[in-house]
Structures are given as structure tokens and as C-alpha cells.
Image (cartoon, rainbow, N blue to C red):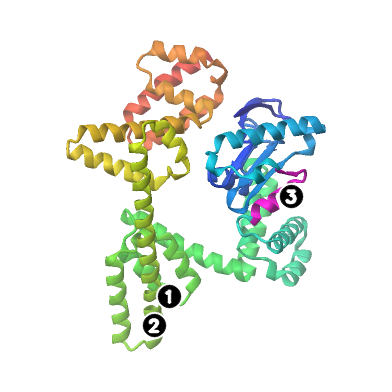
Amino acid sequence: MYTHVTCPQCGTPYTAEVHQVVDSKHTPQLKQMLLNGQLNVAVCPKCGAGGQMATLMLFHDAEYELFMVHVPQELHLNQVQREQMIGQLTKQVMDDLPPEERRAYMFQPQIMMNWQTFMEKVLETEGVTPEMIARQKKQSELLQTLMRADKDVQDVLLKERANEIDETFFAMLQQFVDMASQMQDNKQMVKLTNLRARLMTETAVGQRMEQQQMALHKLSREAKKQGGLTPAMLVNHIVANQAQPHVVDALVMAGQGALQYEFFSLFTAEIEKAEKVGDKAAVNRLTALRADLLQLYEGMQQQSKSIMQAAMTTLNTILAAPDKNQALAENAEKIDEAFMTVLVAKMHEADEKNDIAQFQALNEIHSLIYAQMERTLPPHVQLLNQLVRSESPEEQAQLLQENEQFVSDELIQLIDQVMEQAGERGQDDLNGRLQSVKSLILARL
């Protein structure tokens, strides 16, 4: 749902999306947003001020039989209000679940008044232990101290607490950088950038990360220059960095798509070259690496096959269902990139075979999915999609009149962004439609 927010800093009114139910199984994307600190966050479109909104939140994880509600103290609810709102959320979740998934533990949700305790419970479902949370808390405190400290204090801290500076620490630092960028806090940005630069050069993990970044940058630059990543390109970069396993790992992760038959053929040729010149160390290193990469490739192939088979099963289930909308809702968590790939492939197959009935059935599912996806978009984005699809200026004018509350500078900014993307892709027809819509909106503003 959407709620109206007034920025406490500049007074700008705007809308923000609020989610009060997070289910690990049925809405995994919301759980990921919760873990990333991106759920129920309001940011003023004018000044960038904002933060997390105070709202009741029910979290459910069936695997752990975890059913709990966070009640922010800022809401100042009395016991009756609290029980009534928790009861409404519990009923909503129970009504949305199939009868066979309802369990007794859901009738007594745990009440969490403290946000930190609530998040620790959520993190436990991800395998994050209290010890890991305690370590991250220490890392967060260290980071904030380093941000405020002068060079001499930083020198001491970097020596005494070097073991706390790892990839997680750098990820925390990046979050602070992103936040400062959003808030346009240039002074803070300079301090954070200087701290990151120092950590990259003076800590072991920073040096490893810098080596990885440099290698990935070289690979990316060559791929762009050559029009895409090729197996031969990936082989050359891996061989060049064979003595640095952490760099090789980063290259392989970035170039998984190039792990093909050609890649392994070229890699074997590199081993043969090392054998000819008598470089036994290189032969042993590359042979062991090839074995690891083959194992990774076979695992990827098997995983990909399993994913596609599961997607095909889901598609057949939806095709056979009398109510396609209901079937899509029941399988919402399975409508992912793999499912869409299979769906589009089957549509092409039906089209090539001139199987009109099958194509229409598949196309109906395709249209329903996009209609459902559109309903989850912010209102101003939905409005823009409707305006672009409109057949006449009169229809567009009617839509603008019916949705006057969303006719704003924010909508103009969205149009400009889409126009820029359309221009880059050579979509002249879409660009023309967008320009026409923009003129209508500007006339109203």
C-alpha cells in the first residue's frame, strides 16, 4: 500500500510504499529488501531527506516456524490498539495462505518491541548467528570511530583491530558512501572516500580487493572494446592472474557465461604450452584450476537444467488451470527470470509451428504476468505506462484528469529518464510518444 508523507526537512508532500507483511516463502523479494535495509524507507524526492518509516510489520518463516510482529514504540499504541492491529495482520496472512499451510503457531505471534531484536531473529533464518551479529556490531562501531578519528588515531586502530576489517567491513563502508551520495553531503563523501582509499592500500583485505577490481576492470574494458566477453578473453585473463587465486575467483564469477566448451579447449591448450616450456609449477596450477572450473561448470549446467525443468513444470501447471489469474497468484514465488525465459521460448516455438491455440494460451499468461507486475509499480509509473499505451490525445487528457494527484515534476523526471533510455536503444517511436505525453503534462503544470 502507499502512504502520504510530508518531508520534515523541506515540507514536500510525496507518497511512499509500505509493506506490513514479509513472508520468506511467498514474498522473498520483500525479505531481501528488509535484510538490505531498503524496506519501508521514505526518501524525499526534493531534498533527499528520509529514513525508515515506523509501521507494524509481521514476519513469517514457515521453515523455522517463526511468526512475529514488530510494534514500533513510536506509534504509542495502547494494548487494545496493539492487539487489534496485530489481529488484523494475522488474519490477513492466514486468509492469504492455503489451508494446508496454516499452523497452530500462527495464532500466537511473538511481539517484538525492539527493532534490533526483531532483525536478529530475521537474520537467524539466514544462518547469521548471534556471534556474527556481535562481530558486525563491533565492525560498525569501528567504522564510525574511524570516520571521526584523525590520522594518528586511525593508525592505532588499524594496527590493533586489523582482524575486524574484512569484506563485510568494506560493504558497510560502501553503504555510508551511498547514503552520503544520496544526501548530497559532499563533506562526508570526501572523508569516506579518503578513508576507503587508505583502507584499500593499507589493509590486507583492501589490497586483495583492489587487485580484484583492477583485474575485473581490465576484463570489462577489453570486453566492451571487443563487443562482448568471449571464452578466449576469459582464458587469457585467468592465465595472466593464475598465481593469485582470489583474483581468479573474481574473474570466474564475473565471466561465468563464457564457461563453455571453447573455454576448456583453449584452457587445455594453455596447459600444453606450459608443458612444452617445462614450467611444472604452471602446469600443476592450471591443471588443478581446470579441474575446479570443470566441477563448477558441471554444477552450473545441472543447476540450470533443474531450474528450467522446474519452470516448465510451473508453466504446465498454470496452463492447465481453469483460472489463470489464481494459478499465477498461487505460484507467484516461482515467476522468475527462468520462468519468463521458458515462457517466451515456448511462445516462439508455438509461433513457428503455427500452433495458434497454444500461442494464445501462452500469450494470455504473458499478458497477465505483466498486468500483475504493473499493479505493483508506483502509481506515477503505472500512469505513465497507461499514457504511452493510449490511442489518442483525448484519452491521455482524460487519464491525466483522473490522476491529477500524480501529475508532478516527479512524473516529468521519470519521462526524461525513459526518453534517455529509449534514445540509447534507438526506440524513436517510443521517444515520440513520450515527448507528446510530456508536452501534455507540462501544459497542465
Inter-mark Cα distance, 2 to 3:
50 Å
Residue 54 x %, y %: 72, 36
Instruction: State the residue in front, 79 or 170.
Output: 79
> Crowding near pointer 2: few (<14 within 10 Å), some, many (20+)?
some
- Residue for badge 1: 242
Residue 118 appearing in the image: yes
The secondary structure type at the circle numbered 3 is: helix
In space, the residues marked 3 and 1 are separated at their CA atoms by: 43 Å
Tag 2 near tag 1, CB within 8 Å:
yes
* Of pointers 2 and 1, the one earlier in the residue sequence: 1
- Is the residue marked by circle 3 packed among few (<14), some (14-19), or many (20+) residues within 10 Å? few
Residue 282 circle label: 2
Residue at 45%, 31% (x, y): give it.
372
Q: How crowded is mark 1: few (under 14 residues within 10 Å), some or many (20 or more)?
A: some
Q: What stretch is highlighted in magenta?
A: 109-124
Considering only order in the chain, which callout, 3 or 2, is on the residue closer to the N terminus? 3
In the picture, measured across the screen, residue 403 lies left or right of residue 92, that is left
Question: Position of 384 compared to 351: left or right?
Answer: right
Q: Quadrant of residue 138?
A: bottom right
Which quadrant is the N terminus positioned in? top right
Query: In the depicted view, which residue is nearer to us: 287 or 191?
Result: 287
Q: Can residue 193 be seen in this view?
A: no
Label for residue 116?
A: 3
